[in-house]
Amino acid sequence: MQGSPLGPELRRQEILELANAQTSVSVDEVARRFGVSRETARRDLAQLDADGLLHRVHGGALKTAAEPTLSQRMVENAAAKQAIARAAAALFDAGDTLLVDAGSTTAFFASALAEAPRMTLMTTSVEVAARAGTGGARHRIYLIGGEYRPEGGEAVGSVALEQIDRFRADHAVLTVGAIDAARGLMDYDVEEAMVARAMLRQAARLTVLADASKFDRVALVQVCELAAVSRLVTDRAPSAVLGQAVERAGVELVIASARI
């Protein structure tokens, strides 16, 4: 066995990358490559299957369809995301400083900010920077660099994290892959989750933009507990269980209404 000191989250991310690279992965291969028992390998594959990231089969797992690109995500639940973006843009004031991550909802948010009072934005997203830079607001925009991912139009990795650490912001504005009552905010990608965590550390308050399709779901990596969230802007009220968890955590819930 090669052995690996990786924790469960990072190990599962590497298992996912391995499966996607070669279309499938076996229990024996996971156990051998990561130095874990076959029982642990089975649990990892079962969890990745439960999260919708791999398809579990006898003796191993198969990769699922690739994650949609940003352009594909821009047309999924577009009306809800646009409503969320408009509602969120109205929550910020002239002179505010915002750390904004990459995502389809934050891209719509940047468009909604284009005519808002002048603010300062720091972002890892080329799309967010471009959209916020249009219109008459003339925001001050810092584009954070790093390893470029063309499918998401974003920067990730150690360089991006180092640059984020140089800023302090009034607000972090983040999108997420999933929100669960017990596990809080989660994402499907380790690198994107690390960017989100870095932005959260450097901001005084956190505003999360998430349409209702993200509710009562789990993903691979936890970003933060619900208690770390200041505001959740969404298009529909959450389920009773999640709604109670949001209320207990002291999160301000903002329900956006679609424009008629």
Image (tube, rainbow, N blue to C red):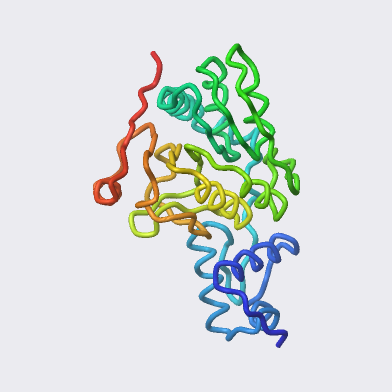
In the rendered image, the vertical position of residue 176 relative to residue 37, given as above or below: above
Which quadrant is the C terminus positioned in? Answer: top left
**Residue at 53% over, 32% down:** 97
Q: Quadrant of residue 121?
A: top right
Q: How many marks?
A: 0
In the rendered image, the vertical position of residue 115 relative to residue 108, given as above or below: above
Residue 66: x %, y % from top left: 66, 49
In the rendered image, the vertical position of residue 181 relative to residue 10, given as above or below: above
In the rendered image, the vertical position of residue 28 relative to residue 136, given as above or below: below
Residue 88: x %, y % from top left: 43, 28
**Residue at 56% over, 70% down:** 45
Residue situated in front as seen by the camera: 182 or 252: 252
Which quadrant is the N terminus positioned in? Answer: bottom right
Residue situated in front as seen by the camera: 109 or 197: 197
Residue 216: x %, y % from top left: 37, 51
**Residue at 62% over, 46% down:** 164
Q: Quadrant of residue 236?
A: top left
Residue 13: x %, y % from top left: 62, 64
Residue situated in front as seen by the camera: 67 or 4: 4
**Residue at 53% over, 22% down:** 113
On the picture, is 55 further left or further right than 224?
right
